[in-house]
Amino acid sequence: MGYAGDANARTPWLDGLASEAVNFTQAVTPHPLGPQARAALLTGRLCPENGVSGYWDALPLYQPGSGTPATGRTVAHALADRGYATAFFGKWHLAPRDRSAPLVGEVHAKMVVPPERRGGFGLWEGFESGFLLNDPWLHGTRLPQPKHFKGYQADVLIQRAAEWLKAPHSQPVFCVVSLETPHPPYHAPAPHVAEVKPASLRLRANVPSGGPVEKQAREELAGYYAHIEATDRAVGKLIAEADLSGTIVVFTSVHGDMHGSHGLFRKAWPHEESVRVPLLIRGLKPENRGRTDLSPVSLVDLPHMAVAWAEGREWHCRRDNALISMPAATEIPLQCPVAWRGFRSAKHKLVLHADGTPWLYFDLTRDPLEQMNLAQDPRHRAAIRELTAML
């Protein structure tokens, strides 16, 4: 983001939103991989407590009154109970999927998510996955069968969400717009965006220079930043077209991407590039606009925030750290191949292997790029032991 100081990013609309919002500069995803992060974001519960552990797990069905834990209950259920009209547009990535089908392509994009698997949203219009950043297939409440739409995916979704938000409603509204970009395949066209030259990009200092890692990072980041610019423009269209003056607006992401930092790519890694996410919240109090908040907020907090706001209450983060984990290993290429768990505060990060032994320990104040792992340093053994016991 431009507002966050990234010289490569052209994000005028999000920069403008940041000037009117609370900027949570220490925000994290609890699980830096799509399905697990989305499950936490929607349920307000960490994985695997919410019923999702691995990449292929579907969000459980919510069965009220069944006597079983309400693992499939989402923020949409909670707000519907409080009189809200609810809507979801975009990528879902939480339904049962065909593991034999290619991850990229029309099979997953055209897969119908049955109504009972749509998280309790009153209106649901989207797609399971498929990574079609252009010309998406959408289905849902008003589209019983997948329909092919021409155009940039984010533009299509924003337009349909804006139309719903602008329509008359007899109830207060809650709307989730789930954009897939920026996401691999980074080489997919990003319309109406000037070419980004790989050689001109400024890389993070922890990307190994002069070899294949730098080359791949530059090539992928050129597409990444192009899609960031196109996505920024789409978000700006929603802000401009829908009257959101009386609406709390939240902007975030489910995870980051390593992009060559530490010689790694993609997500599910416990490093900052994978775990940190933007979080802007434009509320209704003018005194909060343009404010920076250092609270260790996590995506798992957002449903609890939404319920508090719906009830007219303030929400405050009462922790000094946030839990982070990958509860199950993933076999998808380039992603972190092992399970891990840990915590992150503004000052420290501790990550344990699945067997509970220390893997990473960083002093983020002195070492924000995480280039000095202190996990095996005898001088930190007592602190690590104490923190491990707390975890």
Image (tube, rainbow, N blue to C red):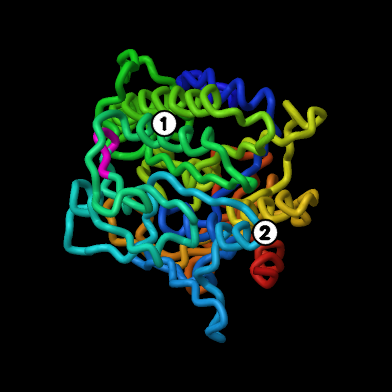
Amino acid identity at mark 2: Arg
Q: Is residue 138 above or below residue 64?
A: above
Do the residues under discs 1 and 2 have CB atoms within 8 angstroms? no
Q: Is residue 138 left or right of residue 174?
A: left
Residue that badge 2 annotates? 82
Q: Is residue 268 left or right of residue 1?
A: left
Give residue 66's position: percent from left, percent from top: 53, 84
Q: Which mark is residue 380?
A: none
Q: Nearer the viewer, residue 85 or 47?
A: 85
Residue that badge 1 annotates? 159
Q: Helix, strand, or loop for circle 1?
A: helix
Q: Quadrant of residue 234?
A: top left
Span colored in magenta: 133-137
Q: Main secondary structure of the magenta part?
A: loop
Q: Helix, strand, or loop for circle 2?
A: loop
Residue 135 lies in the magenta stretch: yes
Examine the rendering and report whether any part of residue 159 can be seen.
Answer: yes
The residue located at (24%, 56%) in the rendering is 111
Q: Is residue 389 above or below residue 312?
A: below
Q: Is residue 189 above or below residue 381?
A: above
Give residue 288's position: percent from left, percent from top: 78, 32
Amino acid identity at mark 1: Gln
Q: Quadrant of the C terminus?
A: bottom right
Give residue 329's position: percent from left, percent from top: 37, 65
Q: Nearer the viewer, residue 90 or 203?
A: 90
Mark 1 or mark 2, earlier in chain: 2
